[in-house]
Amino acid sequence: MSDAENTTVTKTCTQCHEEKIIAEFIRDRSIKCGYKSKCKKCLSLNTDKDKRSEYLKSRYELNKEEILAKQKVYYESNKEAHKSRCKSWREANKERISATISAWNKANKEKLDANRKVWREANKEHIAATTKAWSDANKERHLSLISNWSKEHPERVAAKNRNRRARKKLSTGTHTESDIQNLFTLQNKKCAVCNKLIVNGYHVDHVIALANGGSNDKSNLQLLCAYCNLSKGTKDPIDFMRSRGKLL
């Protein structure tokens, strides 16, 4: 091909879809037209992933509206085929999808919790209505789920019950299951009064009893063995410790 033809004959690249002069394509005698289907620029981009990614991104930004319009037309014309392909891909990549979601959730835990909190606050009535409708329609299963959950999380249930009783008595402060576990560790798994091991069971005691105006906050809690807790009752903590010979 002459130099004149190199600057006048054109060909459309199958990758960038731009019409360019034939000199922008590499010769290939194995192809009927005698030239590669992709231009030199696109072929070089294919060998460099970063450059190709940057090129595709810039090309998308320049032709965003046109690309989105074409995608919409294609989707509307091929809805069922598109859904079928997506379903097949999800079925074939379940583990990959699960791993990706799990990794994203771990990396964005604070953001996810914040979004969930905002959504729950904005949809309180909807959540309450949906929950009630489901529980009314599935009473036996609902009761079974509650029972199983309570058996699996006894400490959390106990903490919720203590907080509820404290609210009824108009006491300030709340505590969680984690607060109790921290106390258990800080007390070296022993009763705070008699130092007896409480690994087989313990009572959560309010140092200053709720009946005497004590708080339900973790700072007013201690773990006692059953005997010490029942002996203490609503007594003043100092008077009780003196009766045990712990204080003068």
Image (cartoon, rainbow, N blue to C red):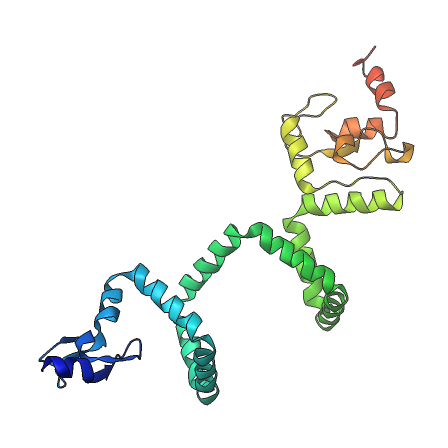
User: What residue do we see at 23% from left, 63% from top?
Assistant: 47
Rendering coords of residue 33 (x, y %) = 14, 85
User: What residue do we see at 70% from left, 60% from top?
Assistant: 120
| Residue 90, quarter of the rendered image | bottom left
**Residue situated furthest top in the rendering:** 248
Question: Where does the C terminus fall, quadrant-wise?
Answer: top right
Rendering coords of residue 168 (x, y %) = 88, 46
**Residue situated furthest front in the rendering:** 4
Placement of 231 over or under 167, stated as above or below = above
Q: Look at the image and tell me whether residue 20 can be seen.
A: yes
Q: Nearer the viewer, residue 86 or 206?
A: 86
Placement of 148 over or under 74, stated as above or below = above
User: What residue do we see at 77% from left, 41% from top?
Assistant: 174
In the displayed structure image, the side of residue 7 where residue 2 appears, left or right = left
State how many labels appear.
0
Q: Nearer the viewer, residue 12 or 220?
A: 12
Question: Where does the N terminus fall, quadrant-wise?
Answer: bottom left
In the displayed structure image, the side of residue 74 where residue 23 appears, left or right = left
Rendering coords of residue 222 (x, y %) = 74, 29
Placement of 241 over or under 63, stated as above or below = above
Q: Nearer the viewer, residue 76 or 233?
A: 76
Q: Nearer the viewer, residue 60 or 170?
A: 60
Q: Look at the image and tell me whether residue 189 can be seen.
A: no
